[in-house]
Image: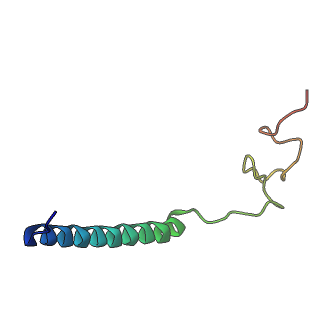
Amino acid sequence: MQISRRHLLAASAAVSVVFIAERGVRLVADAARGAAGALRPPAQGTSATRCALCGSAKHTMLDPRCPIARKVI
């Protein structure tokens, strides 16, 4: 099989498009990763002051008063 100039140019154009698309995907992924921190709400307490299951400030994690905690039957 002989490689013509047309095939060589088409292959080089395809490789260029793949590199440009890959660079664009990386830029979008990096921007999304950076925006995740800005979109995340700020912390309102620690697990020592707030329940991690329901978010209530009236009890802490592993407290039997938590309405979401699993109960032993």
Location of residue 2 in the rendering, given as x and y in whole percent from the top left corner: 13, 66
Left/right of residue 49 with respect to residue 17 in the rendered view: right
- In this rendering, the answer to whether 72 lies above or below 26 is above
In what quadrant of the picture does the C terminus appear? top right
Task: Kindly identify the residue that appears in the image at 81 percent across and 40 percent down.
Answer: 69
Front-lying residue, 64 or 21:
21
Location of residue 32 in the rendering, given as x and y in whole percent from the top left corner: 44, 66
- In this rendering, the answer to whether 60 lies above or below 12 is above
Left/right of residue 31 with respect to residue 73 in the rendered view: left
Dividing the picture into quadrants, the one containing residue 27 is bottom left
In what quadrant of the picture does the N terminus appear? bottom left
Front-lying residue, 4 or 24:
4
- Residue farthest to the front, as pictured: 1
Front-lying residue, 51 or 20:
20
Q: What colour scheme has been applied to the protein in the rendered image?
A: rainbow
- Residue farthest to the top, as pictured: 73
Left/right of residue 50 with respect to residue 40 in the rendered view: right
Task: Kindly identify the residue that appears in the image at 83 percent across and 52 percent down.
Answer: 61
Location of residue 60 in the rendering, given as x and y in whole percent from the top left corner: 84, 53
Location of residue 62 in the rendering, given as x and y in whole percent from the top left corner: 87, 48
Task: Kindly identify the residue that appears in the image at 48 percent across and 71 percent down.
Answer: 34
Counting every numbered tag in the picture gives 0
Task: Kindly identify the residue that appears in the image at 18 percent across and 71 percent down.
Answer: 13
